[in-house]
Amino acid sequence: MLDLQTLKPILPQEVFASIEENLDTDKLREVRLRAGRPVAVWYNGEECFLTRSGVSRSSERAIACGADDVRSSVMGASEHSVYAYNDDIGRGFITVGGGVRLGICGEVVTDSGRILTVKNYSSVNIRIPHEILGISRCIMPDIISKAMNILVISPPGGGKTTVLRDLARRFSDEGGFNVLIVDERAEIACCRRGVPGTDIGKRTDVITGGSKRHAFECAVRAVRPDVIVTDELFGDDADIVAEAAGCGIATVASAHASSPENFAGRKICGRLEGIFDIYCFLRGFGEKTTAELLTELSARR
Amino acid sequence: MTDKLLMAVCLGCLGAATGYALCIRLKRRAEYFADLDDFLRVFSESLVCSLDTVPRVIGDYAARSPLLAKQLGECREAIVSGRPPELSRGSLTEREAALVREVLCGLGSRSAESERAAAENYRRKIGEYGKLAADKYAKLGRSAVKLGFLAGLLAAVLCW
């Protein structure tokens, strides 16, 4: 459960006070601060505006947010040390304690194509993680003795990361496997200063921030995991997953697609063919998530 | 007669004590600026090596000046709690306090390179204040006790 104090340094006082007094943090998923616009929240499964007395569908009495509030939020998330978080800011997010993540929008400063930083922050999206222990039972009711290559597919916001996190925890705790989470954007383990913000299991290691290729190379050469858990496979990622499989390391990964047919039509699907043992297409939301399990996708094209 | 002698001694002691207090104040001001300069040096170095956050650099820094220790504590507390810092002014003039506020409240708001340049720029400005404070202490500080004692005695003679 979220410790509300985690949000204190990153929220304007008025917003924090309203959330503290009126909202149930278990139902709060997102807080959006946009410069010059009302504060919006994703609460109890719907998008609404935050008022002094709670939430409302109308923006009339919503708490207003200024550019300074957005800037203060980024400053608070970076512990008033922008230089220490500059790489994260350049990638568009900062991970705060407890797995809370701050997505940052603003003007990207580049030099010869290289992103230097982001300035004049225009909005932030504060995402509050919700672990649903056991959600991955819809894919695998019991952890089997031999780890398999599993690809979890769903549309954005469909619960892929929650399922991956739970699978990592269960492979680690229930299956006794050494698990390595390759967490490019710190979304699965939500590590801050090396400490995971979520329950990822007792036998789980995390590589945060690097590229998948670098992390997979580290895994094969030095970390020796039984299972690698990673998110959002794209383009060349198929090659490194195949290499890991060749080395006897199972991979559990995710990919975006609105349907199995849609995924079957993607270029990466053809490249992944024969590598993954199970394709799991997620449906539903939260604890009511269900999974359609497929062993091959070529028939769906 | 005894009363007057006692009054002379008391006034002399009072003058010496006032002079001592002034001496301590001048000494602390000189120490304060030297300490602030040292803190900025440590902060600037951390930008090259460890990129520690501002609260950590502040937490790790052992300030020698009581005023700087208090100000750094206030600054850190404000950062952690997410409210604007209110810094103690101590014996600083309004202008000096404004500069210190600018220095401490601005920490961490820039990229590492800009932060280092700003720290070096502030060190130059603080160095000037520090030099003035050190000169004043060297000139007045050491003789303040004697001057205070003599002033006390002079007051006693005038009151005789």
Image (cartoon, coloured by chain):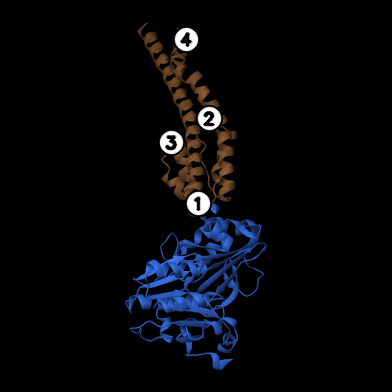
Chain colours: A blue, B brown
Q: Circle 4 sits on which residue?
A: B154
Q: Is residue A120 left or right of residue A278?
A: right
Q: Residues within 10 Å of mark 3 (few under 14, many from 20)?
A: some
Identified by mark 3, the residue type is: Pro
Q: Quarter of the image containing the N terminus of chain B?
A: top left
Identified by mark 2, the residue type is: Gly
Task: Please provide percent x and percent y for residue A283.
Answer: 52, 86
Q: Are marks 3 and 4 in contact (CB under 8 Å)?
A: no
The label nearer to you, 1 versus 4, is 1
Secondary structure beneath label 1:
helix
Q: Are marks 2 and 1 on the same chain?
A: yes
Q: Are marks 2 and 4 in contact (CB under 8 Å)?
A: no
Mark 3 → mark 4, Cα distance in angstroms:
34 Å
Task: Please provide percent x and percent y for residue B48.
Answer: 50, 47
Query: Relative to residue B44, is residue B157 depicted above or below?
Result: above
Q: Is residue A107 left or right of residue A178?
A: right
Secondary structure beneath label 4:
helix
- The quarter of the picture where residue A115 lies is bottom right
Identified by mark 1, the residue type is: Ile
The residue lying at 40 percent from left, 84 percent from top is A137
Q: Circle 2 sits on which residue?
A: B130
Q: Are marks 2 and 4 on the same chain?
A: yes
The label nearer to you, 3 versus 2, is 2
Q: Is residue B3 left or right of residue B97?
A: left
The residue lying at 42 percent from left, 17 percent from top is B16
